Image: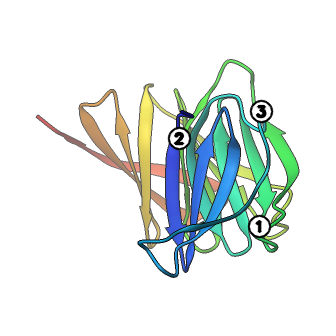
Amino acid sequence: DKVVSEIIVSGNYLYAVSGETGLLIYDVTDPVAPVLLGGTGDNSFKYPAHTAVAGSYIYVADNFRIVSVDVSDPSNPQIKNTYIQDQYKSYFDIFFDGKYLFATTKVHVVAFDVSTPHTPVPLATYEGNGNFSDIAVAGNRVYTISRGLQVLSYQVTDTAAIINLDKEHMY
């Protein structure tokens, strides 16, 4: 059996990501009888953590890189680009808010321009106190969890600046 590290559903498609099988795309129009449509093949990813859907693209946070996959033809998804950040900063989570792609590393929150979907371009980076994990975006607010103890909130007033506004501790 292969280990799936992340699934995400968009429309009638379920996307499953694994370090062993790559990206698999299923048609889930009939949820009790999913149909495998296609995939990227084995070894497409090393350590996939999370995925985000942005139109006809899937972005995979895969260890030290963000991989963009064109899924416009679900039977034949194509890896288009790999954005590699500093090799010592693994990507933990990724979120697409409809315009920008946001990602967390151990010490950063990064905003990417994906107006050219196959080429994510970093726009802004916020360096925090470390151990960022999950990320969510609502409006112009970005929320992360740091060290498993704090919910951090940021305001994105301009894509060139991510501003830390407040912190709220979780206990």
Residue 43, label in figure: 3
N-terminal of the two: label 3 or label 1?
3
Residue type for callout 1:
Val
Element class at badge 3: loop
- Mark 1 vs mark 2, foreground winner is 2
In the rendered image, the quadrant that contains the N terminus is top right
N-terminal of the two: label 2 or label 3?
2
Residue lying at the far top of the rendered structure: 88
Element class at badge 2: loop
Disc 2 marks which residue?
A: 4
Residue nearest the observer in this picture, 85 or 44: 44
- Which scheme is used to colour this image of the protein? rainbow
Residue nearest the observer in this picture, 96 or 71: 71
The residue under the point 74% across, 21% down is 87
Residue nearest the observer in this picture, 163 or 74: 74
Disc 1 marks which residue?
A: 71
Residue type for callout 2:
Val
Residue 121 placement (x, y as % from top left): 80, 53
The residue under the point 77% across, 37% down is 42
Residue 2 placement (x, y as % from top left): 57, 34
